[in-house]
Amino acid sequence: MQSVPKNICSPSNLTYNKSRDGFYQIGFGFKQHLKKISKESLIRIHIFRRKGLTMKKLFIIKSLLLATILITTDAYALLIEGSFYGKVRTFSNGAEDINLTGYWDNVTEGSEVSGSFWYDTDKAPENTSEFQTSSFYQTYSDEWMGSNFSIDGKTYYISDLSLLDGYNIKSEGVWLQNFEPAIDDSTKEMFYLFDNISTGGAAGGYKAIGLMVEVSSEINPLLNGLGIIQEFDWYDSGNPTAYAQAYIDVGAITSNERKASNAWVDISEFHLSVKNNTTVPEPSSLILLLLCGLALIIKRKWSQQIKNFAG
């Protein structure tokens, strides 16, 4: 079994000569090209000079307009969203022998658990698996995935863990298996997601929170290849060749609290879907839109001045 893998109008050809009437005549080195300069081009140059504008300033404004369009276009991402529902199989809620209390008050075997997660496929890392029938996308960060779980009327968000002043270990990833009988002697397909953070204090202390979700099937297909973009729904039908489970964990040993709770969850319902063209909020969006509007207003005023001058 596999283990987790670790032209002719170039600047050099342009010359500028100022004539007595204040116009700038542009030459390309050949008389036939000089004849092609339109009246509107000369009018534009005259207006730019009267208003204290230069070709360089015009180039800068047009460049800002182009940059606005390009950067705004980049504010889209492809997100994968998932959710699950299940019941507690086994759990641990504190430990009397080491003086730990638990986070949960009314959890028993069979208590309901739910959770959700998302990940950004544009920010996800490259596949690092060395195997032909599996893929592994993992980073030691908290940048392209988010998750939470709910139990005992409380919701825990992985990324909200308050960090201590010592070390921080963040790990998020997706592991996919799509076995082939000729290679793996199996037809198993698996989707496995994990999102964990642990932190320690310089003077002692420890905190951790994590979520692991797995959906596996030996017969019925789950995956669409081994790419990180996946979409499927799974329901527990009692078929022994397929199962889904989750592991949730939260704990802290500091000067203010000594708590620890964890549980294995039998999942009865799992959903994974693609959310297309989701706008990603960016602080600079408003500025970019204002620049775009300003450039359009200036261009409209220049066009009107050209028409008045030509008329």
Image (cartoon, rainbow, N blue to C red):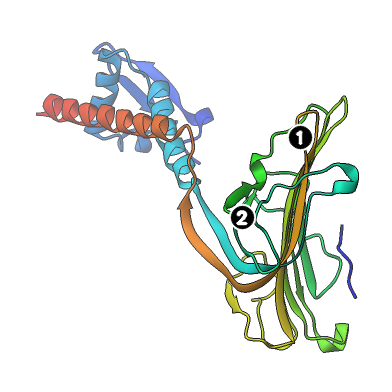
Classify mark 2: residues with Cα within 10 Å, few (<14), some (14-19) or many (20+): some
**Residue 113 versus residue 55 in the image, above or below:** below
Instruction: State which quarter of the image contains the N terminus.
Output: bottom right
Secondary element at image label 1: loop
**Residue 202 versus residue 49 in the image, above or below:** below
Q: Amino acid at mark 1?
A: Glu
Dot 1 and dot 2 residues touching (CB under 8 Å): no
- Residue 299 x/y as whole percent: 27, 30
**Residue 1 versus residue 5 in the image, above or below:** below
Quadrant housing residue 221 = bottom right
- Residue 136 x/y as whole percent: 78, 62
Foreground residue among 21 and 235: 235
> What residue do we see at 76% from left, 55% from top?
262
- Residue 189 x/y as whole percent: 74, 78
Q: Estimate the spatial distance between the alpha carbons at disc 1 and disc 2, rounded to whole Å.
A: 19 Å
Confirm whether residue 162 shows in the render. Answer: yes
- Residue at mark 2: 152
Disc assigned to residue 257: 1
Q: Is residue 66 left or right of residue 195?
A: left
Q: Is residue 83 left or right of residue 133?
A: left
Foreground residue among 226 and 260: 260
> What residue do we see at 66% from left, 64% from top?
228
